[in-house]
């Protein structure tokens, strides 16, 4: 079994919109949280900040650890076609705030764009499961509240 440890961020703006990155690797794609793999010897917090900058153009600070999510992905569902072993993905999710930079798209990376989304629009997106996990950790509802009618 392979192991991948990664760090991600939940970032919202003053309007409550959530920043997502569009992951596009090989034949699969979808919206995800900005973030990614931790390099050997790298602190997870440093990895989160580095990955957010690479994927979105923003410099961020951590507002705290939201949680850690562990998932085993069967070999048949991995994006890499040249492996026949499962992947144990450990994802560290932080809440973060922007302190500088400007929105831009990553070039020659695993993501190809970044955008802001109102929470109620996120359910309709083609996204990876981590988005829902992170939003739940942050207490961000993605469905518009229903209105009771008499």
Image (tube, rainbow, N blue to C red):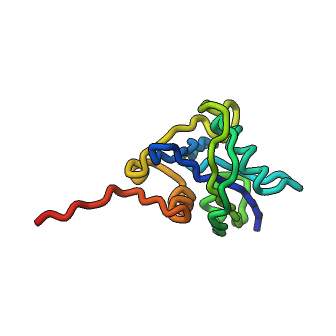
For residue 23, above or below residue 42: above
Q: Residue, x 63% and y 40% (percent of image)?
A: 111
- Quadrant position of residue 87: bottom right
> Which is nearer the eye, 78 or 56?
56
Image quarter of the N terminus: bottom right
- Residue 14 drawn at (x, y percent): 49, 43
Q: In this view, does 145 lie to the left or right of 10?
A: left
- Residue 127 drawn at (x, y percent): 50, 51
Image quarter of the C terminus: bottom left
For residue 77, above or below residue 33: below
Q: Is residue 19 left or right of residue 86?
A: left
Q: Which residue ends up furthest to the left in the rendered image?
A: 150
Q: Residue, x 53% and y 48% (percent of image)?
A: 12
Q: Residue, x 66% and y 69% (percent of image)?
A: 70
- Quadrant position of residue 138: bottom right
For residue 80, above or below residue 76: above
For residue 38, above or below residue 55: below
Q: Is residue 150 left or right of residue 128?
A: left
- Residue 7 drawn at (x, y percent): 70, 55
- Quadrant position of residue 109: top right
Q: How many marks?
A: 0
> Which is nearer the eye, 108 or 34?
34
- Residue 147 drawn at (x, y percent): 22, 60
């Amino acid at each position: 079994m392979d192991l991948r440890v990664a760090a991600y961020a939940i970032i919202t703006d003053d309007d409550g919109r959530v920043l997502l990155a569009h992951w596009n690797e090989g034949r699969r794609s979808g919206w995800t949280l900005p973030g990614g793999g931790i390099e050997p010897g790298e602190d997870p917090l440093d990895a989160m900040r580095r990955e957010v900058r690479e994927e979105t153009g923003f410099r961020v600070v951590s507002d705290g650890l939201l949680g850690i999510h562990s998932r085993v992905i069967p070999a048949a569902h991995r994006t890499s076609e040249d492996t026949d072993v499962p992947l144990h993905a450990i994802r560290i999710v932080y809440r973060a705030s922007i302190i500088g930079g400007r929105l831009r798209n990553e070039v020659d990376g695993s993501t190809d764009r970044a955008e802001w989304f109102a929470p109620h629009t996120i359910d309709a997106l083609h996204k990876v499961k981590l988005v829902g996990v992170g939003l739940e950790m942050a207490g961000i509802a993605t469905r518009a509240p229903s209105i009771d009618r008499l």
